[in-house]
Image (cartoon, helix red, strand yellow):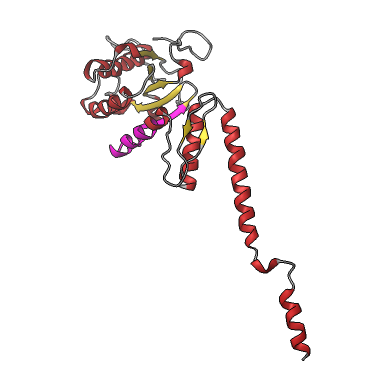
Amino acid sequence: MLARMRGPRERSSGHGGGAGGRWLVSYADFVTLMFGFFLILWASANQDPVKFSELALAFRRAFNTGSMVGMQGTGEIIGTGGRMGELQISPTLRISETAGEIIEQMGLTDEASVGMRRDGLVITLSGSLLFESGKADLRPESAEVLSRLANLLDSAEGKIRIEGHSDNIPIATAGIPSNWELSAYRASAVLRYLTETAGMPSARFETAGYAEYRPLVPNDTRENRARNRRVEIILMSARDNGGVPVSQDGAPAHS
């Protein structure tokens, strides 16, 4: 009889916790949504559209949904909301992803890369992929990758700068007296292919040769020197279009 009297009191204990802590799930969802909301507010204050698009794309990948987020000052909505919403990412980010796919498909991940820096989207091609050692004539094998990149870049707007870079080993031949000429000639060779062979408008381009003075890594090993021998194709950001490239000390770049 005593046990029967205690039973109801035991079942009624717990102060409303009979739901088994399900309220924690709702609370966690709320905290996650608030975190995402404030992260979007922070991104909206950032004037860099590429970074904003990257954030929106990260949300789509994380939650597998469209994101109802607006780009500051444009009134543009990225995504239509809902599980099947299509996310509109920036043309620069789309080109970056596609260029990365081209490089991977062609098995060139050790000789080419795609990245972002202050002045725009950078496609880096190793010197060994494009040229014979100490020469500035394009190798026939480089035509396919340059052709595919040209088709991709032709779909974008804005200026394109092609930069040539060398290592710190001096060169002195009849046709190439120094690394300044070598880096500039190599940039010009890529330019000529993109305009004369691939048919891109010449007015979109500018070139620069920096010799060994903008290395990616110290020129202290054979592998590092190989990394520094490169050509960079830069799809310039809107704020840099029409500008004159300058060297690190503020002087006009060698071109």
Query: At 57% across and 30% down in the image, what residue appears?
Result: 44
Q: Is residue 107 magenta?
A: yes
Residue 47 appears in which quarter of the rendering? top right
Give above or below for 59 relative to 171. below
Outermost residue, bottom direction?
Answer: 1
Q: Could you tell me if residue 224 is visible in this image?
A: no
In the rendered view, would you say 74 is above or below 242?
below
Residue 251 falls left or right of residue 179? right
> How many marks do you count on the picture?
0
Q: Give the quarter of the image for residue 35.
A: top right
Closest to the observer, 214 or 177: 214
Q: Is residue 167 above or below residue 243?
A: below
Residue 173 location in percent, x, y? Answer: 29, 12
Identity of the residue drawn at 36% across and 16% down? 183
Q: Position of residue 172 (x, y in %)?
A: 33, 12
Residue 124, located in which quarter of the rendered image? Answer: top left
Image quarter where the N terminus lies is bottom right
The spot of residue 76 in percent (x, y) is 48, 29
User: Toward the viewer: 63 or 82?
Assistant: 82
Residue beneath the point at 47% across and 8% down: 252
Residue 238: image x %, image y %?
45, 18
Residue 18's place in the image compared with 192, above or below, is: below
Tell me if I can see residue 97 in this picture. Answer: yes
Start-end of magenta stretch: 96-116
Q: Nearer the viewer, residue 35 or 105?
A: 35
Q: Quadrant of the C terminus?
A: top left
